[in-house]
């Protein structure tokens, strides 16, 4: 769940652009999908993100990325909402969503389980304090999780 150098550079470049457009940067992903390199920038704001927000950030960011020439090869830029099932990656993300349910995927199964849903009770020293669905508390270092996302409940 760590950022690579390109993701870090794009994150920093996108921050003032997002702020100027009344949104915040939630996450950045840069990865190969099929034959394409895809750069995804997830944005957020109180009340939700509209398509116009995505379009404004995308245009400004595309212009700045071309000017700075951060990414040498061809890529596809996508700007979208962080979504209700947003990924939690930074320490501040975890702290923002204490007492919310999260879907956790592990790199390696523990006690025969690789995916589970739990309540995020606390986050400290790089580890999540979780309460599993069978009411057991566990401490899980963030680096053991390949993915932590907010649970979507209807």
Image (spheres, grey):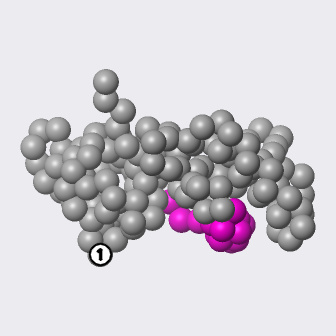
Question: Does any portion of residue 149 appear in the rendered image?
Answer: yes
Q: Is residue 36 left or right of residue 52?
A: right
Q: Residue at coordinates 77% horizontally, 58% vertically from top-left? A: 61
Question: Is 4 included in the stretch rendered in magenta?
Answer: yes
Count of numbered tags: 1
Location of the C terminus (image quadrant): top left
The residue furthest left is 135
Most common SS among magenta residues:
helix
Q: How crowded is the residue under tag 1: few (<14 C-alpha within 10 Å), some, or many (20+)? A: few
Query: Picture quarter containing residue 68?
Result: bottom right
Q: Position of residue 94 (x, y in %)?
A: 35, 59
* Residue at image mark 1: 125
Outermost residue on the bottom side: it is 125
- Left-right relation of 22 to 122: right
Q: Is residue 5 magenta?
A: yes
Q: Secondary structure at mark 1?
A: loop
**Which of the two residues, 2 or 10, is positioned nearer the viewer here?**
10
Closer to us: 105 or 96: 96
Q: Residue 47 at what x, y percent from top left?
A: 45, 42
Which span of residues is magenta-colored? 1-17
The answer to whether residue 71 is seen in the rendering is: no
Residue 121 falls in which quadrant of the image? bottom left
The residue positioned 31% from the left and 29% from the top of the image is 153
């Amino acid at each position: 769940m760590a950022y690579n150098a390109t993701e870090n550079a794009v994150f920093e470049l996108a921050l003032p652009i997002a702020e100027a457009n009344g949104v915040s940067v939630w996450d950045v992903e840069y990865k190969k999908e099929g034959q394409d390199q895809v750069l995804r920038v997830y944005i957020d704001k109180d009340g939700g993100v509209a398509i116009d927000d995505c379009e404004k950030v995308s245009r400004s960011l595309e212009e700045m990325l071309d000017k700075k020439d951060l990414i040498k090869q061809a890529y596809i830029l996508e700007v979208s909402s962080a979504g209700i099932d947003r990924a939690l990656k930074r320490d501040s993300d975890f702290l923002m969503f204490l007492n919310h349910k999260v879907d956790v995927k592990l790199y390696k199964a523990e006690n025969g389980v690789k995916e589970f849903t739990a309540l995020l009770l606390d986050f400290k020293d790089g580890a999540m304090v979780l309460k599993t669905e069978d009411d057991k508390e566990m401490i899980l270092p963030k680096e053991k999780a390949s993915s932590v996302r907010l649970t979507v409940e209807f």
